[in-house]
Image: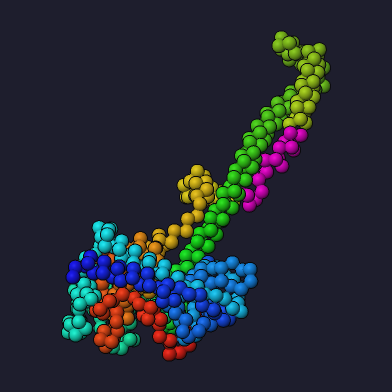
Amino acid sequence: MKLIDLIQHYAQALAEEHDAAAQRGLDAPIHAGSGRKLATAGTLHLYAFDVPASAPLAEDVPVTIIPPGDQEPTEGFVVGRDNRTVLVQTFDAFGQTVDSASIVPDASAFFGTASKRLADMAGTSDAYTLGPAERLTPWLSPDASRAEQLARGPVATAAFTTLWEEDPAARRTRLAALAIELARHNKRTLLISPSHRRADDLLGTIARAMKAAGLTFKSLLCRYEMPLQAEAGGMALSELGFEAQMHQFYARSRADKAALRRKYERFRELTPLLAYKAQKQRDLDEVKLLEWRLLTQLSDLQRKIKEITATLAEYESLPIWKRLAMQTTGKNVASLGEYKTIYEGQVQSLLHELEIAKHRIDELSPEAAIPKDLRPEYDELKDDIKKLGGTKQIREMLAAEEDTNRQAFLQNKRVVATTAARVISDPLFGKMRFDVLIADEAPAIPASFLLAAAGLVRERIVLSGDPREVAVTQALGRSRSALTPTDLIRRPASSPPSFA
């Protein structure tokens, strides 16, 4: 069977599940007992509800929660099931606790979305890189026998690798080493698991290995949903959640933007103030220069008056020849007195102008004075503005609307961990492309989900799991190989969960 035919086969099988979901009661409302909020990350909230053991709630199925009273309903999806406790990730909070609620699953929408994703892959195959996915055809073909699958043994090629290991710890250690190698080669890896709890466990192992290898694991790893466990492998998982990381990033971005706005507004406030101070300083300098010129003229006039006064005082005692010499130049007692009177009048005029100049200086000095810390602050702001491209560039940055682009943020991560069901049902993953797909616990992943994830990778697919499970699970090589309602209901965990 060719890959396109295989994809169409599973798309049709999921479409049949969509048509039968309502008849099988998968969309029927479920009465939930007490609910409690366990954690919050950004705009997402994790709630735990008590439900009947027979309630057909499966992981990654979208649900609508209707709280009692007049509270508005909220939407979300199931992320975990532990016997009578179901974990729901919601987009709105409705209190710390709730006495009761109605949970309305939408399995029909889940199957419909999954079927459309596979149908889109088959119909627009040019938009996908299906070369690596071709390697899954003999493994996922409906007519492939389990005996043939087991007989194949491990495979290791450039585009397709199998890592079968009975010991889960050893298997995760090998996957962690592979994830580190891929991250060092700047490969974008999609890590899928059959359940959110297993995704948490594997992500914790990889985080611990990356930390030991000296890598900045917090910037490389991302758990797409809210982690169900506070820690795994000795590593805190709350900081690796996609929503928490994105919320922190945009919180820092908004804080940086607010700080930049304050700097820009302060710069705009100081610029005209310092320009006014500079103008007043120029005026003050001109007045001080005028004062210096007036003082120079006054000093010259006072010197001349002093000389005339001295000459008149000793005029009678001067020799006759000196008097005659002075008279030839027009300097006699009468003319010297006139000169003195003229000079004294000029002195009075200069003194009046000096008084005006000093008064003007007294007015300009405080207006031109710059506070001690104002100039360094302005110079620092001016340098920052210049480094950021100038005031025009900053105005454009501040005017730009904040776009919380989830796709761009997720594409910056090297390893994205989620469930296979989430990949096929979330529209965001339909737009994403990865270099490598690592399917942990691959025998427990429905073939249709595995194909949907394989269509998103360009270079390599790695299947990992317990080889003993290949013979007993219905995920690889089953006759229908599509998710059925029975598959959706996960078996209860052996121990209570350690919630985040």
Placement of 414 over or under 207, stated as above or below? above
Colour scheme of this structure image? rainbow
Looking at the image, which residue is at 73% across and 10% down? 330
Asked if one can make out residue 77 in the rendered structure from this viewpoint, the answer is no
Q: Quadrant of the N terminus?
A: bottom left
Looking at the image, which residue is at 51% across and 77% down? 30
Q: Quadrant of residue 11?
A: bottom left
Which residue is nearer to you in this view: 419 or 349? 419
Placement of 386 over or under 120, stated as above or below? above
Q: Quadrant of residue 364?
A: top right
Q: Residue furthest front?
A: 23
Q: Which residues are magenta?
A: 358-376
Residue 474's x, y, as percent?
A: 29, 82
Looking at the image, which residue is at 50% across and 49% down? 400
Residue 499's x, y, as percent?
A: 50, 81
Looking at the image, which residue is at 78% across and 17% down? 342
Residue 304's x, y, as percent?
A: 74, 23
Q: Is 364 inside the magenta-drawn segment?
A: yes
Viewed as shown, does residue 258 lie left or right of 406?
right
- Taken as a whole, is the magenta stretch helix, strand or loop? helix
Which residue is nearer to you in this view: 62 or 486? 486
Residue 64's x, y, as percent?
A: 51, 70
Which residue is nearer to you in this view: 393 or 389? 393
Q: Quadrant of residue 113?
A: bottom left
Asked if one can make out residue 348 in the rendered structure from this viewpoint, the answer is yes
Q: Is 231 inside the magenta-drawn segment?
A: no
Q: What is the count of numbered marks? A: 0
Viewed as shown, does residue 267 lie left or right of 220?
right
Q: Residue furthest top?
A: 328
